Amino acid sequence: AAPGVLTPLNTLPKARYPQPPQQIQYFNTLLPKLASLPGVTDVGMVAPLPFSDNDQSTSFGVVGQPATAPGMQPSASHLTTDGNYFHTMRIPLLHGRTFNERDREKSPPMIMVNETFAKTYLGPGNPLGQRIKIGSSKTIREIVGVVGSSKHDSLAAPAGPEFYIPFPQAPATYLDLVLRPAAPAPDAIPPALPRAVPQRPRPPPSPVAPPPPHPPPRP
């Protein structure tokens, strides 16, 4: 994650939040609560989290470009985020807009891309308004914003192409929260944070077999 950013994991139990509307409502309630904590300046969410050894790469096609042969489609890192993720991570908006409250579950499908994606796959024209089809989905998404490229897997490797889907249009029960505290110290955890973010329960310890009895002493 970016320096100075806290990244608590938040996993919803599927039995309690089985449907997308329930998952969306949970995070719509949680994020403002976190943003109001003393010592927190910005809050966002993402899946998968950068530098978590969990890169999700998905093939795509650009509407209007020549079709590629099966199995030869380009691919890029696929992230699900909210609109404030980029500001929290200090990723600059270069063109268009970030996600906002208009990008709901039943709103027109939207997508954002990073600068590397735009330069690599969209040509010299305006990337805004171009349309992307992801994987085998029939849904066509319109590009509404382009952000600066940021590294996802390794500081030694150049930033790769990424695209971003708004959380309400791709809800899930597994997301990483990103919080930027006001204090620069990496351990500046707001005292109320553990109470505000429900923690994933730890598995019970494995049973430990008792040691074998000592053999009786020889006569």
Image: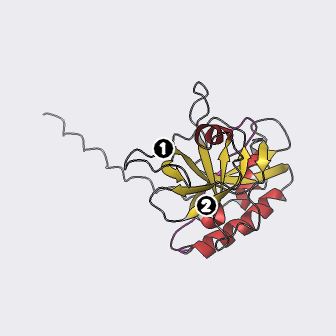
**Residue 31 location (% of width, % of height):** 75, 61
Q: Amino acid at mark 2?
A: Arg
Q: Is residue 137 above or below residue 114?
A: below
* Overall secondary structure of the magenta section: loop
Nearer-N-terminus badge (2/1): 1
Residue visible at 44% across and 59% down in the picture: 136
The magenta span reads: 1-18
Using the image, tell me which numbered label, if any, was put on residue 74: 1
Residue visible at 32% across and 48% down in the picture: 210
**Which structural element holds mark 1?**
loop
Q: Residue 203 vs residue 218: left or right?
A: right
Quadrant location, the C terminus? top left
Q: Amino acid at mark 1?
A: Pro
Is residue 162 visible in the rendered image? The answer is yes
**Residue 201 location (% of width, % of height):** 55, 59
Examine the structure image and report whether residue 11 is included in the region drawn in magenta: yes
